[in-house]
Structure formats: C-alpha cells, structure tokens
Image: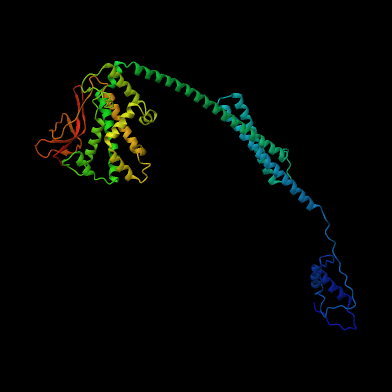
Amino acid sequence: METSPTTAGKPPQISEMFQKFAMAFKSKTFEFFADDDNNKRSDSEGFALLDSAEDFIPDQKVVVIKPDPPARTSSNEGSVQKRIVDTQMGDALVSSIFATVSMFEASYLQLQTAHVPFEEESVKAADKALVSHLQRLSDLKQFYRDLCKNPDFEAGLSFGSCLEAQVQENQSKLRTLGLVSDRLQEEIDQKDSEVSALRKKLAEIQRANAKLSQNLSGNLSTASCDILLSVRVFDSVLHDACRATNKFCKILIDLMRKAGWDLDLVANSVYPDIDYAKQGDSRYAFLSYVCLGMFQGFNLGGFGLSESETVCNGHAPEAAESTSSLKQLLEHVSSNPMELLSRDSSCDFSRFCEKKYQDLIHPTMESSIFSNLDRNEAVLKSWRSLSTFYELFVRMGSSIWMLHKLAFSFDPVVEIFQVEKGVDFSMVYMEDVTKRYMQPDKTKLKVGFTVVPGFKIGRTVIQSRVYLSGLRCTE
C-alpha cells in the first residue's frame, strides 16, 4: 500500500498509523519470553516491516499484543501413563502365553506317558488339561485382537503379574523334566532286567556247553565219530592246510626277494634240472619245499617230536591212541593257536612249531632275510618279531597239526604218500598242480617233483599234487 511522503513538521494521520500496526500484527507475533536467539531473530523479522523511511512513525510507541499461551493440560501425562500401562499389559500377556505353552507341553507329555502303559484316568485328566490350555491360548489370542482394534478395551481376562507367569512356566518345565526323568528311569530298569535275563541265559548256555564238551571228550559216541571221521571232512581240512601253506610261501618269497635273493637260483638248488614251462613257476619249488617239510613225520604218531615213535601208516591204531588223537583234535579246534602258544610254550603244538621252523628256515637264511629287511637287528633278530610272518607260520602249523590228529583218528590210520621225480604221471594218484597245461605229444608225462603229498583213506585216494616236466604252456 503506497503512502505519500510526510514532512517532519506534519504528523501522520491516526488511521494510517493503525493500518500499519494491523499489518505488523498480522505478519508476526512477538514472543518476549522466548530464548535469546529466538528473540533476536523475531525482533529483526518483526521490525523489518517498519524499517523504512516512508513508513517510520516518529514519536509513537508501539504496543504489541501477545496472545495468551495455550492452557496446559494433562494429555502428555495421560499418554505417558497410558504407554506405561500398555507396556505392562504386553509383558503380562507375553508371560501368560509362555506359561500356558509350557503347561500345554507338560500336559501333552503326561498324555503320552499315560498311554504306555495305558491308564484311563490319567489319559482323561491329561486330555482335559490340554483342552483347558488350548482354550486359554484362544482367549489370549482373542484379547490381543480386541486390544489392537480398541486400546481402551477392557475385558474380564486376568493375567496376573509377570513373576507369577514365570513361576508357572518354571513349574511346568520342572514337571516336564520330571516326566522325562521317570520315563528314562523306567527304560533303564527295563534294560537292567533284560541284561539280567540275558546273563542268566548265557550262564545256562555255558553250563550246557561245558556238559556237552565233557560228554563229547569223555564219552565219544560211535555216531558222532562216524560223522566227524569222513573223507569229505579230511579233504576239507587238507584244503585249509594247503591254503595256509600258500599264504606263508608268498610272504617267504617276498622277504627273500626284498633281501636280494636270486629266486630262480634258489629253486634250482631245491630241485635241479627242472624245465619250467612258464616263467614264475619256480614258486612251486618253494611251495614243495615248505609243504613236504611240514608233512615230514606225518606217518608217526607223535609227528616226529620224540625219538621212539612207531610208524602207523595204513595200520590200525590202538583204541586208546585213536581216542586220544580225536580228543586232542577237538581241544585244538576250540582254541586259538596264537593264544595256545602264549599260554603254554611247552605243549606239543608249541614244540611242533619250533621244530618245523628250525627244519624249514636255516639260521643263515633267517639272518639274511631279517637283517637285510631292516637295519634294526635288535628288533628283527627272531622270526617272532614279524607279527604277520609269525602268525601265518603258526596258522599253517595249526592246520597241519589238526590234519595229523584227524588222520590218526581214522581206523585204519590215513596213509600218506608222495611221488618221486621221473615217475610216469597217473591220473589216479596224481594231479597237475598248475591245472593249465596240456600234453604236447603222445609221450608219457614225467613227474618233476611233488608239491603236496597224497593220502589214502581206506580205498579212497586223495591225489598228490605234482609239477610235471616236459610240458608247454597253453596260455
């Protein structure tokens, strides 16, 4: 609004003065009791409207009307109090939910426990408690929904304090743990009962076995002897003995090879002038050396352990000797040969193993094999130092020892035989140990050497395994 300039001698009109005052009042309200910074900013903003040469009113006082401050109410205090109330209610609600869930879990476990064994009253009580806890959870859920819709909602649902809810929750957990502990204790008691019953059963079986063993060793019946003393049983034990001998020969050849021995030269020293059909067949010479050495003295009643022994090859043994051999066989079968040697080093079987080892492994051969195998001669100074070598030798000796006791249990005693070098091959008494060669011409085949001896059981012949000379390889 434009105004005409006034001179110093002419005062302004009253209407113009009130008009400017009204404009200043509408633009800004001054706070006299505000902070200093706000006062300075408000003063500068308020008087900026009067700060002009043409609008200045000299010799006039400006009266600023300050509106009354809004009356203080208790709304803030009410909101804080309401917020506190809502927090307490939320804590109580959550605690009640946890307590109810814990009680539900305890009741459910009680329901499961009541089914095994089935107790009708306990099942009904647990089922009723489960329904009440589920109803409580449903009420809490509905209360929370109503409270979210209307914060001023008031219901008759009681929560109690947080501490009371925590106490209920802990009590429910303790009850759950108690039920679990009772169930585990029942299982432990049941297992203890089963163990006691099994121990009694084991004791009865052991007594029955001891009685049967006593009857078998003391009073061997004819029927049991007929079943045990058969050609098939003897052939099976012989097969096990041959397999154990093969395993021992493999590790012996491996040790000799590692010691730097010329295996072909050693085989030629055992059986000279043998024309082997295939390279590697010289291993049969080692097998023959070990096998025939182990079977040496097989036709003697004491297996050559004593000097005064009678030859029983093909002759009927005395009844007492036959029964003693069968008894020794049964005792040896029921024991571990390794444990037998460690338990009684002076028994016949231990003496047999020591004697056969000394016959097969020359001291020079033993020193060469073991000292070259490892520089620690203090450890490998004996054949017992190598566990695998020692175990295979003992198992080979055990199988041949059982075969000897079985042979002397027959009536008449099983006869052993071997074929000399250069004898014509006979399919009745002999078998080609290689099982893979054919006769080159119509000429008769000759025996190079015997690998495994043959046996006669009455009129039954178990063929001797021989290596034939003059063959050609068909592979």
Q: Residue at x 37, y 31 (%)?
A: 338
> Residue 294: x and y, percent?
26, 32
Q: Quadrant of residue 175?
A: top right
Q: How many marks?
A: 0
Q: Is residue 15 left or right of residue 319?
A: right
> Residue 53: x and y, percent?
83, 81
Q: Quadrant of residue 449?
A: top left
Looking at the image, which residue sits at the far left? 442
> Residue 348: x and y, percent?
32, 26
> Would residue 396 be seen by someone viewing this image from the given angle?
yes
Q: Residue at x 32, y 23 (%)?
A: 328
Q: Quadrant of residue 443?
A: top left
Observer-nearest of 222 and 315: 315
User: Could you tell me which quadrant the C terminus lies in?
Assistant: top left
Eyeballing the image, is 430 above or below 310?
below
> Would residue 244 be seen by someone viewing this image from the given angle?
no
Eyeballing the image, is 257 above or below 127?
below
Observer-nearest of 8 and 280: 280
Observer-nearest of 293 and 148: 293
* Color theme of the render: rainbow
> Residue 100: x and y, percent?
65, 37
User: Could you tell me which quadrant the N terminus lies in?
Assistant: bottom right
Eyeballing the image, is 26 above or below 454?
below
